Amino acid sequence: MASRDLARQLAELKKRVDRLEGRAAPAAAPTADDPHVTYSGTGPWRGGPVVWQIIRGWTDVLAETGDRSATLFSALASTPRLRIVLELMDGEVLTTADLARRLDQPSTGQLFHHLKELLAAGVIYQPGRGAYAIRREHAVPLLAMLCAAIDIRESTLTEAYDDHPHR
């Protein structure tokens, strides 16, 4: 590998680490010429806090939305699955028995069905046999999705129907 390639890869790696650890420079304000979506967060995580900031181009987000996004939203469109995600949100690795106990889930068959859907969508992973967790880098994106759901729900509850274009 050429030293120039190695230097470029190291510079890219440093940028990624800085972004992951929240040391990256704050994003510039979006403009009409360069619209983008930014979300960030910090919170408790087993083994130390998680700090995250994501910046994506507006048009890139619109272009990337498709089947993978639908699979993810479908996996999260269930109260029992959201409860599983919330139980794993602090970074703890939980076994099937732990989850069944915490969720007061008498049927492990139903629990396995929900875990399978979350695994298939990439929401959770198995660090070991019969154990489940959320990847550290997915914590803030998942919480941002939950925040967006709250914001959308609250705005629809408080909006007057007068704003509807077909009325």
Image (tube, grey):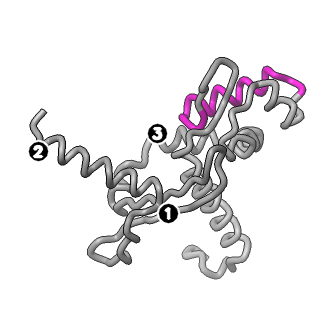
| Residue 25 sits above or below residue 110 on the image | below
CB under 8 Å between discs 3 and 1? no
Q: Which residues are magenta?
A: 106-124
From this viewpoint, which residue is outermost toward the top? 129
| Residue 127 sits above or below residue 49 on the image | above
Say which quadrant the C terminus sits in: bottom right
Residue identifier under label 3: 68
Distance of label 3 from label 1 (alpha carbons): 20 Å
- Residue 120 magenta: yes
Q: Nearer the viewer, residue 59 or 15?
A: 15
Q: Position of residue 99 (x, y in %)?
A: 79, 32
Residue identifier under label 1: 39
Q: Position of residue 90 (x, y in %)?
A: 69, 46
What's the residue at 58%, 58% (across, down)? 144
Residue 101 placement, left or right of 48: right
Q: Secondary structure at mark 3?
A: helix
Q: In the image, what residue type sits under mark 1?
A: Tyr
Q: Position of residue 49 (x, y in %)?
A: 60, 54
